[in-house]
Amino acid sequence: MENLDNEEEEQGSLLSQEPYDCAFCGEENEVGVDRSGARVQRFTEDCAVCCRPNLLSITIQHDNSVEILAEQEYEA
Ligand SMILES: [Zn+2]
């Protein structure tokens, strides 16, 4: 599934794919961020490479840029 000529963000679209580095293996992943949602979002995503769970803390800045912190999620 290649969709590489989608670099430009569509106007009016508040959903974008943002990169983050896996907290376990360091490989780059992408996560869909909904800018129309909460300013701070936390959820878990499995790494596409090593399949381990990253706890993502996503912060949407005032200028609509996106900051993503990936942490290792441990099972309770
Ligand atoms: Zn990984």
Image (cartoon, grey):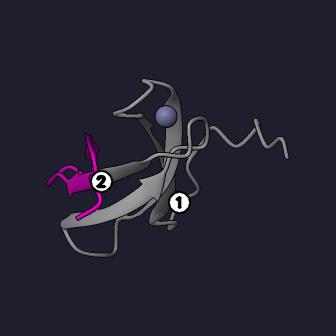
Q: Position of 25 compared to 4: left or right?
A: left
First in sequence, mark 2 or 1: give its number.
Answer: 1
Q: Is residue 69 magenta?
A: yes
Magenta stretch contains residue 26: no
Q: CA distance from mark 2 to mark 1?
A: 29 Å
Q: Is residue 58 above or below residue 3?
A: below
Give the amino acid at mark 2. Leu
| The magenta segment | 56-76
What element does badge 1 sit on?
A: loop
Q: Position of residue 27 (x, y in %)?
A: 50, 26
Amino acid type for the residue under numbered disc 1: Gln
Q: Quadrant of the C terminus?
A: bottom left
Q: Classify residue 59 by image quadrant.
A: bottom left
Pointer 2: what residue? 55
Q: Secondary structure at mark 2?
A: strand
- Camera-nearest residue between 26 and 9: 26
According to the picture, the residue beneath numbered tag 1 turns out to be: 11
Residue 44 has which mark? none
Tell me: 1 left or right of 64: right
Q: Position of residue 46 (x, y in %)?
A: 50, 52
Residue 14 x %, y %: 44, 66
User: Which residue occupies 85% across, 47% down?
Assistant: 1
Q: Confirm if mark 2 falls within 8 A of ligand 1.
A: no
Residue drawn at x 52%, y 38% is: 29
Mark 2 Cα within 10 Å, few/some/many (few <14, many 20+)?
A: some
Image vertical order of residue 71 relative to residue 34, above or below: above
- Residue furthest to the bottom: 37
